[in-house]
Structure formats: structure tokens, C-alpha cells
Image (cartoon, coloured by chain):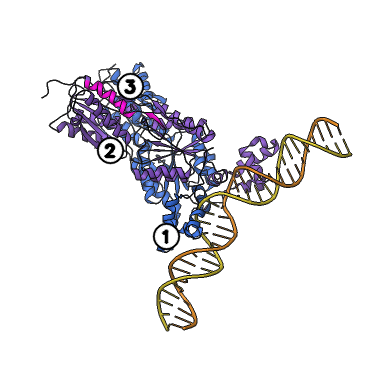
Chain colours: A blue, B purple, C yellow, D orange
Amino acid sequence: MSLKPHTPTLHDVAAAAGVSTATVSRCLNFPDQVSESTRINVICIINDLGYSPNFGAKAMAARRTNTIGAIIPTMENAIFARGLQAFQEELRLHGFTMLVASTSYCPNIEEEQIRSLVARGADALLLIGHERDPEIYRFLQTQGVPALVTWAFTPGSVRPSIGFNNRAAIYEMATEVIKLGHTKLALISAETAMNDRAKARHVGIQNAMTDAGLKPSSLQFIETTYNIEDGANAFEKLMKSDTRPTAVFCGNDVLAVGALRCAREMKISVPDDVSIIGFDDIELAQVAYPALTTVHVPHREMGRRAAIALANYVKEGTPIKAVELKARLVFRETLGPARKDLP
Amino acid sequence: MSLKPHTPTLHDVAAAAGVSTATVSRCLNFPDQVSESTRINVICIINDLGYSPNFGAKAMAARRTNTIGAIIPTMENAIFARGLQAFQEELRLHGFTMLVASTSYCPNIEEEQIRSLVARGADALLLIGHERDPEIYRFLQTQGVPALVTWAFTPGSVRPSIGFNNRAAIYEMATEVIKLGHTKLALISAETAMNDRAKARHVGIQNAMTDAGLKPSSLQFIETTYNIEDGANAFEKLMKSDTRPTAVFCGNDVLAVGALRCAREMKISVPDDVSIIGFDDIELAQVAYPALTTVHVPHREMGRRAAIALANYVKEGTPIKAVELKARLVFRETLGPARKDLP
DNA sequence: TTTGGAAATGTAACGGCTTACATTATATCA
DNA sequence: TGATATAATGTAAGCCGTTACATTTCCAAA
């Protein structure tokens, strides 16, 4: 019912400028193919009329959108924001626009979003993690839309990815934790269904336990969604259990901060009574009190590299090479030696 | 150069199904106008072929996209995330899709994003705050794209908005602060250029000071960008000045948390030595230590209402009514009485 | 059997832009 | 000055859906 007051089109501009639509189009897309006088004239008219090219028509005619879609699990916490920011900035340097969609960690919504972005003409897609219905990969195949997986790097995976080895990273951290004398470990994880990163982290800790002579089955494991509140709840449960762990790994910093808050409320001292370990190293981790020991994920670097790879692929057809980045352990204040005086 | 393996089109489906394109189109958009046998047949073929309608073509033909754009200053902190989440959820209920773009608080980028979303066929736009180049409003006018302003409610504004009165909210908080004996106040603000919310908050504090008999000019005022780091830096500067304030207002919780961190590093006790007040009440505020006294902004409600208003406007032409929501003061631990023993 | 109307389907114009190809204007050189 | 290369512009055929309108099919009632 919106009273569209006839949006100006290329034709209107062309008519007003006394040139053909082709010339106007060239003014916009290949300015140097047009004589200066014509160009200036046309540009003025475009401004006067408030003309703006219709994206749909343009995409259809050019069979190219210069748009790359990014589908992330959530925007509600900063975990993906930084990587995405870098992704976007780099993309822009290459003349691409980013379209974001979020899935709330739900595979169905993710599928829907993928279809939506493809329909919108995304020239390529950035996806988080490998694990999804093969049907989706097939769909992308038929549509001819390349997809790059990031935030994960699984050695030997079929699909190229730019990310880090989640398993190895947490393995390293767990090993350090165990060295400090911790034997009773717990993990507050994201839901592992359709989440290869979460699975890898789970396995990584278990591997470290095995290699250190601990029984991996003794790892207390809670799956939850990714909110501060959830972290607090899970932590409380852990602390009230009769096999209270001395070190609690968290699937991410958000969860860890929730755990930290809960510890404070319960008057449990961190790290004296219990150590808490995060994952991601978002800003929150430094601000938390005590500051969070965590695994630093190279968000920006991942985003940047992904953008370059995708841009080059779309523009030049350069094949995408898998890149393994390194996650780094960051020791701050929430990790300490295991308490010995407990039962 | 991407080897598009001929994306299937409506024609392909029609040919394969032995029907006309119109019938296929109807199967998709008005299934009940098609006989069941035809429909099933067509749907199967669609799946086999992996057909997905081309958004651009669809938008052009239907002259409607069912897409509403949202342009926010930043995704890097959670301030807008929650409101947007609610916006999106509600939009979805009405059959609309949301497209987000962020501006890094830069007017030029905002303009660019507005044009981009309009070009992409957004049926309407959600904007943060009133203040922007009038040229942009004119552009939206010619393009026939309605825009709704949110996150702000300025009484008597020409343009309808759904938000809260930034000035009044902080006025109320400042009045409480002054009641606690604070006379030396400071404000760490976002840049106020082209940011009516920031301006309103500045004015609100000054109004409260005036009304309480304080000189508004004594308010120490620092403008900065919106990162934790910036909050810390600004706070440090304030604490090192020779007119050290006893209460520091922050433009948002992110800045406040930065200030808090700095205070900890400088061994300044909060709230004994200095009070810190945030704005927004994002999750961070509860997690901070000490927990942040702040102004609770009804993010979700704003998002929801905005979605309803916009959806109804686009679908039925229902005029958009301005709505004033209430912000609420949340007293936690970072606000205390002014210290009396200081010079 | 005929007939009228509803249901199902088909036809084709249209939407706004790009671009290959054709045409015209301008500059360059012998 | 005329021939020719080059720059500038124009023409018109798509791109892929939707939808008004036309046509065909089907069924029930007469």
C-alpha cells in the first residue's frame, strides 16, 4: 500500500540526460569509457533525480552481485563479531559487500539462511564449521556457489577451510591444566550436535587426559546453550555435585564469565578453589575479574584470510587453499594449581 | 570465472515437468491454485533439480521483496544485538526477512548502507536515532521506502520513532547520583557528532545539574569511540586530572566496563572512591565486578514494536505511530555516596 | 447430450539493467 | 586531404520471474 512515487530508473536518467541507457550504465560502471562532459552531465542528473540502481535488475543482467554471504551461529555475543568485521573490511577492499545472517545454532535455520543468501545472489558463502547436512553441500554445488568453511580446521577434511585445530588447541591447554595437578576436570560445552568445533574440543580434552594417564570418562560434561546465564547454571550444578571438579573448561568465554559470576555468588574463590578456562579470548576475557585464562582464537586473521581467498576465487577463479592458523594459550588469572586439601 | 554449472531456472523446471512457467510459479506462491497431481509432480522436479528462485528476478517481477533492512552502528558489541534479535523474530512471524548492515558510527558508511539496502529492494528500513543528513531522508522519500527511527524518542520530532527519551532517562539517573552527594561529575560519551542519543544524554545530565543547583559547565566531558579500551583510557585521564570526579557517567556499558577495569588497575575502589554509571544494561553489566549501575533500555520491546509497526505499514499501509517506551534505572554496585574526605 | 461455470493451465508482456555488437564522431598519420 | 585507427555512443537482446488475461478442461445440472 506504500505509495511508491515512481522510483527513477535508468531510462529516466537516460531520457533526462539525452543519452542512451547504455551510456548511463557505463557512467556508473566504467566511467573511463565515457567522455568527461557526458559523464558529468549524467552524474548530475542522477543526483537530481535521486536515482539508485535496482540491485535485482543489476544482479540479473550482470549475473554477478559482488556480494558474499556470511552465516554465523549468533550475533548475540561478540564471538563472531570481530572475525566478521575483519572479513567485511577486507571484502570491501576487493569491492565486495557482505551479507550476514545468523542461525541461533539451529541447523534448520542455517539451511534456510543459506538458501536465502543464495537466492539473493551471493557469489560465495562463508560458513562456520564443517558439519552440516550433505544435502546442503549438494545444493550449493548445483547452484554453483562456492562455500568456505572457517572457525575450524580439521586435518584431512574434504572441504577446504581456513581456521584452527580446535582439538589440538584445547589439547594443549588441557595438558597445561593437568600439569598443574588437576585431575578432576569438567567441561561446560555448547551442544555438540551438528557442531564440530564443540565436539573437537570435547575430544581434545579427553585426549589430553588419556595421554596424561587420567580416565577420560571421568571428565564431567555438561551441554548447554551459549549464554552467560547458562554458564552460571552449569557451573552451579558442577559445584554442587559430590564430585566437584577443580578445573572447569568452558566452551567459550561467555560461558566462562557466567561461571565466574556464579563462583563469586557462591563465594568460591577462583583460582584458589577452582580454575576456570575459557575459549576465544574476546574482550570480555580481559575485563572479567579475575581475568580469564583462555585460548586465543585468531578471529581477525581468519576473517581476513577468508575474505581474500573468497574474493580471489570469485574474481579470478584462484582455487581456495586450506589454511591452518594457530590458536594461542593465554594465561591470565583464573587458572592456578589444583587445591590439594580437598577430599 | 566461477564455473556456474547452469543454475536451474523456472523454465527448466517447467520444461522438465511439462507445464508452463506460470504453473510452476503458482505451485510456489499459490499452491492451492494448482491441482494436487501437478503440484506434487512439480515439487519433485524442483527438488531433483535443486531449483531455487532467483531473488532478483522475483523482486523485480513482484515489485516487493518482503525484506526489511536494519542499519545499526555496530555489531562489535552486544548493544544492538538483542534489539535486533527481537526485531528479526517478530519480522519473521509476519513473513519478512531482515537484512542487517552496520556503519561503525560513520555517517558516510551509513548513507552507503542505506543506499545499498534500498537498492537491494528493502521494503522498509529500521534506523537508529534521528540525526542524519536531510538529503538521506529525501532520498528515501523519492525511493518510496519508509524508515522507522528507533533507539530514540524525541518529543515533537517530525519523524515517528519508537524508542525512549534518552534525555529524560539519564536526567533521572543523574538526579539520583546528585542526591547521593556527588557534585563533581564526568561523562565519558560517544562522539556526539551526528549522534542525537549521545547528545541527549549529555544534555540530560547537564539539566539535572542545573536543576540541582550545580554548574552544568563543571561536567567533565570526554568524547570517544565505543570500545572497552577507550573507556579505560578516558577513565584514566579523568582520574589523573586534578579535578577528579566522584561520579563518572558512561555513554554505554561497554565504556563503563572499561572504566571499571581501569579503576581496578589503578587500585581505585568502586564505588567507595568513585561511582561509575553505565547505560543500556546489556548482560555485561551484571557480570562486571562490581556489578554495574546502569540505565536499562527496553531493547527487545523496541525491536518487537518496530517490527510490528513496519510490517503492518508495508502490508496494510497502517500508519506508523510513535511510541515512547520507558527506560528504567537499575541500581547495582557501582554507585555509592560521594566520598566526603576528598579535597 | 448439452451447457454453464469453476478450476486448471497457458501465453506473453513487463520489470530495470548489462553488454555484445553496430554505428558514428574524433583524432592521427601519410 | 583522405584513409584509418580509436573513442564515444547507441541498439536491442537477454537475465528470470510474476501476473493479467486468454484458453482449455472438467464436472454438475438441466
Residue placed most toward the observer, A62 or B279: B279
Q: Secondary structure at mark 2?
A: loop
In whole angstroms, how far apart are the C-alphas of marks 3 and 1?
72 Å
Nearer to us: label 2 or label 1? 1
The residue type indicated by label 3 comes to Pro
In the displayed structure image, the side of residue B244 where residue D30 appears, left or right: right
User: Which quadrant is the C terminus of chain A positioned in?
Assistant: top left
Pointer 2: what residue? B191
Give the number of the disc on residue A245: 3
Please indicate, yes or no, whether residue A310 appears anywhere in the rendered image.
yes
The prevailing secondary structure element of the residues shown in magenta is helix
Give the chain of mark 2: B
Nearer to us: label 3 or label 1? 1
Other residues around mark 1 within 10 Å, as few (<14) / some (14–19) / many (≥20): many
In whole angstroms, how far apart are the C-alphas of marks 2 and 1?
37 Å
Q: Secondary structure at mark 3?
A: loop
* Position of residue A210 measured from the top left corner of the image (x, y, whole percent): 36, 30
Pointer 1: what residue? A39
Please indicate, yes or no, whether residue A247 appears anywhere in the rendered image.
no
The image quarter in which residue A286 lies: top left
* Position of residue B258 measured from the top left corner of the image (x, y, whole percent): 25, 32
The part of the chain drawn in magenta is B160-178
The residue type indicated by label 2 comes to Glu
Give the chain of mark 3: A
The stretch drawn in magenta includes residue B174: yes
Nearer to us: label 3 or label 2? 2
Residue placed most toward the observer, A208 or B287: B287
Marked residue nearer the N-terminal end (3 or 1) = 1
User: Which quadrant is the N terminus of chain A positioned in?
Assistant: top right
